[in-house]
Every structure is written in C-alpha cells, then in structure tokens.
Amino acid sequence: MSYEVELSHRAFRYLKRLDKSTRKRILRGLRDMEEAPFGGDIAKIRGIKDLYRRRVGIYRIIFAVNSAQRQITIVTILPRSGVYKKL
C-alpha cells in the first residue's frame, strides 16, 4: 500500500518555478517516496521533531510522515545552500 504525497503551497510554488528537467527529477523522487518514504538518501533533521530530508541532486525535499494515515507532507523544496537556514 502506498503513501499519499501532499505538497505545501510553498513547495508547490517552488516546484513550478524550476526548469523542466529539474522538476522531472524532483517529481521522480516524490513518486519514489509514495512507495517507500524512507528509501533513498533520507536523513532525520536534527533539532526539529518529525522532519526528514531527501536529497535529490543539489535540492533537498523537507517532509513529515504520518504513518497512521499513510501520508507524506512536503514542507519545502529548496537548494542545499538555503534550505536549512529557512527551517
């Protein structure tokens, strides 16, 4: 059974602004998360409860997982250089 991926407004806006090839790579990563939310290059974000990051090239997908409802909420998608400053 797969998880449902939900994008925040902030993540959706950023994803729309990306070039087509980068957007496709990130969308592929999001589709992979539907089947295995903790598969791939995933790490828990230290100091922030229940937030994880997935690395897709130079970009980081910041997300929370609700296992009971089988839902993944994408908080933000940003390049590595600025993502941790904005949390």
Image (cartoon, grey):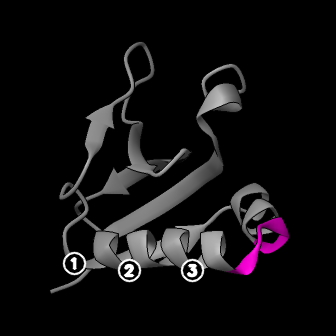
* Alpha carbon distance from label 2 to label 3: 10 Å
Say which label, 1 or 3, has the lower sequence index: 3
Badge 3 marks a residue whose secondary structure is helix
Identity of the residue drawn at 69% across and 19% down: 85
Tell me residue 62's x, y (percent): 51, 45
* Alpha carbon distance from label 2 to label 1: 7 Å
Q: Amino acid at mark 3?
A: Lys
Question: In which quadrant is the N terminus drawn?
Answer: bottom left
Tell me residue 56's x, y (percent): 45, 54
User: Residue 24: which disc?
Assistant: 3
Circle 3 Cα neighbour tier, 10 Å, few/some/many (<14 / 14–19 / ≥20) = few
Residue at mark 1 = 35
Give the side of residue 6 with respect to residue 78, left or right.
Answer: left
Please state the total of marks drawn on the protein image: 3
Q: Amino acid at mark 1?
A: Glu
Give the side of residue 8 with respect to residue 31, left or right.
Answer: right
Identity of the residue drawn at 47% across and 51% down: 57
Circles 2, 1 touching at the beta carbon (< 8 Å):
yes
Q: Which residues are magenta?
A: 16-20
Residue at mark 2 = 31
Give the side of residue 37 with respect to residue 16, left or right.
Answer: left
